Image (cartoon, rainbow, N blue to C red):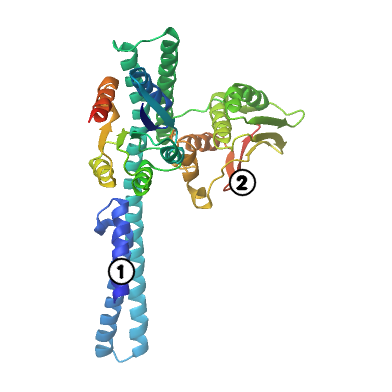
């Protein structure tokens, strides 16, 4: 009896965490429906044995009705599960976006307060530092808004992929060069091993650039200090096969199924740095899918992560 | 020498507050995350701690809790300086022992630094 009450309290606690009322909470509904089914089948059995002689027939009918009730309760709890998931994602969106936007906005506010303040001595060197911080924070906001707009276009289905004959090898080499300064800051070396005689292929360079940039960026950010990132590019049948491996903090197994979800950031990622919208991989997956390729990963906590994607050559 | 420990992962914010207060005789020690912050609180024994809530590795509330549980650091006043606006966060911070709570965007740089200076004068 006490155990039952205890279990009930825990469920109500869980439901509160999900942010929906108890009557919309899937776990609670499931419990309620379970009780209803048990009570209904007992009552039905008692009534049935009163009026119908064939016990076997009563039992069969009872099972049939219980099954129907079970299917109905399953459908109900499933739909409420989906509803609470949507509610959770919506509030997560508001929390993440408002924090990610508020941070650079506060920075800009205080930078301009400093630059316009009459009470502080400002050397030209100091002023230059503050102006470049101003630039950086504005870039941050632009990047976030750009990503949000891209995500919105992806959801509406209106982002056109314009394929043209390009070299994925050159695109990767170029991005590695551009990431060098960032990688050096973390003391990370990037090594690229392209296969010989790779053919040019048909893809949209603007969008694929976003994918590779995001994968390289993540590999640098979540690598342990002084690590090595390795990138391979090969031709496998009719596809180009891209592989990027880091020896960084890795992704916990419990998070694996959420990695490509919008706004999802693994605990390990958040622990490394609080900046990050959780949109990069969602955008990357949408682009690769639209380009008729595949993207996947392998990862072990504390050991590292390897991301793969394929793109059709034609 | 008035020592302030600033636990905040945004370097721009650290610099801005530091550049206003340091010329006025305060020493600002910066910690980029909660772990470093807790360590420095013990070794440096600051007169005041400024604490952000959204921090890498350890959330600000956990840092606040640990600061108030440790006999070496529990007497140091803590000002929570953050962008989180919800009432429940303010209540929780005060419950955990923070002296006061400022929402960054509600104040100009000068207003916040004036408030910090006033707390020292008390």
Pinpoint residue B113: horizontal percent, then vertical percent. 29, 24
| Distance between the alpha carbons at the discs numbered 1 and 2 | 39 Å
Q: Mark yes or no: residue A33 visible.
A: no
From the image, which quarter does the N terminus of chain A lie in? bottom left
Eyeballing the image, is A131 above or below A280? above
The residue carrying pointer 2 sits among few (fewer than 14), some (14 to 19) or many (20 or more) residues within 10 Å by Cα, namely: some
The residue positioned farthest toward the front in the image shown: B1
Pinpoint residue A16: horizontal percent, then vertical percent. 28, 55
Q: Circle 1 — which element? A: helix
Per the image, the residue denoted by label 1 is: A6
Q: Circle 2 — which element? A: loop
Pinpoint residue A18: horizontal percent, then vertical percent. 32, 52
Please report the residue visible at 33 percent of the width from the left and 90 percent of the height from the top: A54
Residue closer to the observer: A184 or A90: A184
Pinpoint residue B82: horizontal percent, then vertical percent. 32, 33
Checking the image for residue A303, the label placed there is: 2
Eyeballing the image, is A276 above or below A6? above
Please report the residue visible at 37 percent of the width from the left and 72 percent of the height from the top: A67
């Amino acid at each position: 009896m006490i155990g039952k009450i205890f279990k009930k309290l825990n469920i109500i606690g869980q439901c509160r965490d999900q942010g929906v009322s108890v009557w919309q909470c899937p776990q609670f509904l499931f419990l309620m429906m379970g009780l209803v089914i048990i009570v209904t089948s007992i009552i039905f059995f008692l009534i049935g044995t009163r009026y119908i002689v064939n016990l076997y027939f009563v039992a069969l009918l009872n099972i049939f009705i219980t099954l129907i009730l079970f299917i109905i309760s399953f459908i109900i709890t499933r739909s409420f599960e989906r509803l609470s998931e949507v509610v959770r994602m919506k509030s997560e969106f508001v929390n993440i976006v408002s924090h990610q936007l508020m941070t650079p906005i506060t920075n800009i506010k205080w930078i301009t307060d400093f630059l316009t303040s009459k009470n502080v001595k400002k050397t030209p060197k100091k002023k230059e530092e503050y102006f470049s911080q101003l630039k950086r924070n504005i870039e941050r906001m632009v990047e976030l808004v750009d990503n949000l707009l891209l995500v919105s276009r992806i959801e509406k289905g209106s982002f056109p992929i314009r394929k043209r004959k390009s070299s994925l090898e050159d695109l990767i080499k170029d991005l590695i060069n551009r990431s060098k300064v960032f990688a050096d800051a973390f003391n990370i070396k990037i090594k690229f091993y392209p296969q010989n005689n790779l053919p040019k292929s048909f893809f949209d360079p603007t969008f694929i650039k976003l994918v590779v940039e995001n994968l390289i960026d993540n590999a640098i950010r979540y690598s342990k200090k002084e690590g090595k990132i390795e990138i391979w590019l090969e031709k496998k049948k009719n596809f180009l096969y891209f592989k990027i491996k880091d020896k960084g903090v890795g992704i916990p197994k419990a998070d694996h199924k959420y990695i490509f979800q919008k706004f999802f950031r693994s605990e390990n990622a958040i622990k490394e740095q609080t900046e990050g919208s959780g949109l990069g991989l969602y955008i990357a997956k949408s682009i690769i899918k639209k380009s008729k390729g595949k993207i996947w990963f392998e990862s072990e906590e504390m050991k590292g992560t390897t991301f793969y994607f394929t793109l059709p050559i034609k | 020498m008035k020592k302030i420990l600033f636990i905040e992962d945004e370097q721009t914010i650290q610099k801005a507050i530091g550049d206003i207060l340091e010329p006025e005789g305060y020493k600002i020690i910066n910690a980029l995350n909660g772990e470093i912050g807790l360590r420095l609180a013990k070794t440096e024994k600051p007169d005041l701690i400024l604490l952000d809530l959204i921090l890498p590795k350890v959330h600000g509330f956990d840092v606040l809790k640990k600061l108030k549980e440790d006999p070496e650091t529990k007497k140091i006043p803590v000002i929570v300086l953050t962008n989180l606006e919800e009432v429940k966060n303010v209540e929780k911070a005060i419950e955990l022992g923070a002296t006061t709570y400022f929402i960054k965007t509600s104040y100009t740089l000068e207003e916040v630094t004036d408030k910090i200076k006033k707390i020292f004068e008390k």
